[in-house]
């Protein structure tokens, strides 16, 4: 069973991972930006976890899978 909300959250997570991979370590502001992206990723993880556990009227997501 598919879940659009889950798909959307996961694609956001993938986008953040890609962004993190693209951030060059030798950029002057790379560390700051990396920290910011990592924080957004953390909160997205929490959101996905919450959605999978009880995102459907307090019930688990039918599309719950390993991210
Ligand atoms: Zn769902």
Image (spheres, rainbow, N blue to C red):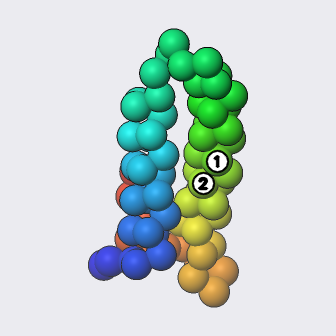
Callout 1: few (<14), some (14-19), or many (20+) C-alpha neighbours within 10 Å? Answer: some
Q: Is residue 47 left or right of residue 26?
A: right
**Which of these two is toward me, 65 or 5?**
5
Which SS class for mark 2? Answer: helix
Residue 31 against residue 67 in the figure, above or below: above
Q: Nearer the viewer, residue 1 or 26?
A: 26
Dividing the picture into quarters, in which one does residue 39 lie?
Answer: top right
Across and down, in percent, residue 30 comes to 59, 24
Q: Is mark 1 within 8 Å of ligand 1?
A: no
Q: Which mark is residue 31?
A: none
Q: Position of residue 37 (x, y in %)?
A: 60, 40
Q: Name the residue carrying label 2.
A: 44
- Mark 1 and mark 2 residues within 8 Å of each other at the beta carbon: yes
Residue placed under numbered mark 1 in the picture: 40
Residue 32 falls left or right of residue 24: right
Position of residue 5 relative to residue 40, above or below, is: below
- Tell me the element at label 1: helix
């Amino acid at each position: 069973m598919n879940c659009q909300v889950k798909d959307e959250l996961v694609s956001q997570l993938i986008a953040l991972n890609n962004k993190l991979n693209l951030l060059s370590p030798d950029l002057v502001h790379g560390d700051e930006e990396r920290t910011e992206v990592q924080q957004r990723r953390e909160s997205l993880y929490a959101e996905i976890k919450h959605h999978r556990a009880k995102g459907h009227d307090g019930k688990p997501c039918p599309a719950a899978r390993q991210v």
